[in-house]
Image: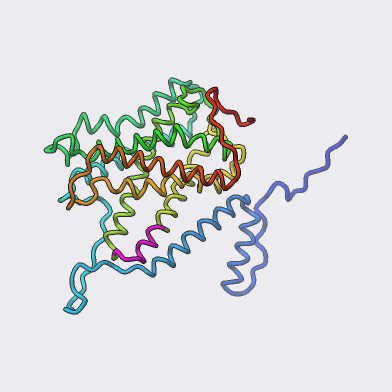
Amino acid sequence: PTSRPTPAAAFHPHPPLPAMPVGAVGMGFAFWTWLEGALPPVWITMIKIFASMFVGLFLLSYTLSRAVVKGGGKKGGEVVYAQGQWLASRKSNRSKHFAELFILKYSACWIASVGVVIAWGPYEWWGKWGYLLYCGGCAAPALLWPLSFPLKGDRKLPRGEWYILKANLWVAIFGFIGNYWYTHYFYNVLKADYTFEAHRLNDVPISMYLMTHAYFMFYHVLSNAALRYLRSAYRGDGQRFVFECAFIGVMSYSTAFMESLTICGFPYYDFADRDMAYTLGSAFYGIYFLVSFPMFLRIDEDDKKPLTRHSQVVWEALGSGMLVLCLLDFVRLWLGIDFTMKAGGHSLTT
């Protein structure tokens, strides 16, 4: 039998712009109508999600009050507002300041290498040892470089006071929990799958445990900077607390989505429904950061208090991991999805 010809519209060509009504509102409506026809439905959904989040955050920002350094109040005088601070203080918190700078510079290197790998595709012939070597090479400098070449802020300090070691410890614990436990929620809820040949621990490629360390070191330094600026530039009242909660939510969802988007060119991390992975999956993954972003910031953040002990770093990372696990499971129960963790490995078909 002969197949019916496919209508031209099924190929989703960019439709011509409709006749635009007069006025800015009409032009905007016409452009949106054209955009809905030109882009896949999932991208329209993501535009709506991000537009809603950022508009809401923008409106909430009007409730914030700038922190005042001096002036104003009953005494009057010229008001001097606090300057927002992105990195930890170079004068009073040198270990953390130079550690954050190092992580940003080191991250630029491994991110560039990921771009090259995704573009050229050498992973096609790597095999399981190649994945392990590459991902280990991305993660190892976060620890080995500072140990071999102490950072500027650590050269006169005992190693027990180095922030970079505490940051590595926190991220290593949280990242291990995330891979060992949370990945199975992606297997069950989002029907995700790693399909490349790999050494595995609890059915998760060991190379992903390593790569997670590099990613999370970068993410958490960025979140440190954003939250620190917010807390240093604006008055610490109830309005700022509400804004900060919303801000962490937006950062978490955005971080999760951007990771999903940037690795979409890697063909061996598969989803049964990739559109759902972008929308629901980003919210699911973002739960990690709802907890970890504010908790990670606590390490050696207040230079007026004693330094964070390594034991405290361990317990807070473990506690954060448990809270995320509970939140993921609450979502799973709400969705009504059964959870299984198989010793012999999972399958998208089971």
Q: Is residue 118 left or right of residue 313?
A: right
Residue at the spot 41% in from the left edge and 31% down from the top edge: 209
What percent of the width, then of the height, locates residue 171? Answer: 34, 38
Q: Quadrant of the N terminus?
A: top right
Q: Is residue 215 left or right of residue 14?
A: left
Q: Is residue 341 magenta?
A: no
Q: Residue at x 23, y 68 (%)?
A: 68
Residue 5, horizontal then vertical, whole percent: 81, 43
* Circle count: 0
Which residues fall within the magenta stretch? 236-245
Q: Look at the magenta stretch and give its main secondary structure.
A: helix
Point 20% across, 32% down: residue: 149
Residue 273, compared with residue 77, is above or below; it is above
> Quadrant where the C terminus lies?
top right
Q: Is residue 16 left or right of residue 120?
A: right
Residue depicted at x 75% and y 48%: 8
Between 182 and 86, the one lying in front of the other is: 182
* Residue 113 visible to an observer of this rendering: no
Residue at the outermost right position: 1
Q: x, y (%) of residue 119? A: 48, 34
How is the structure coloured here? Answer: rainbow
Q: Foreground residue, 155 or 249?
A: 249
Of residues 327 and 165, the one nearer the viewer is 327
Could you say where residue 47 lies in the image, as x and y percent from the top left? Answer: 54, 56
Can residue 99 be seen?
yes
Residue 240 colored magenta? Answer: yes
Residue 230 quadrant: bottom left
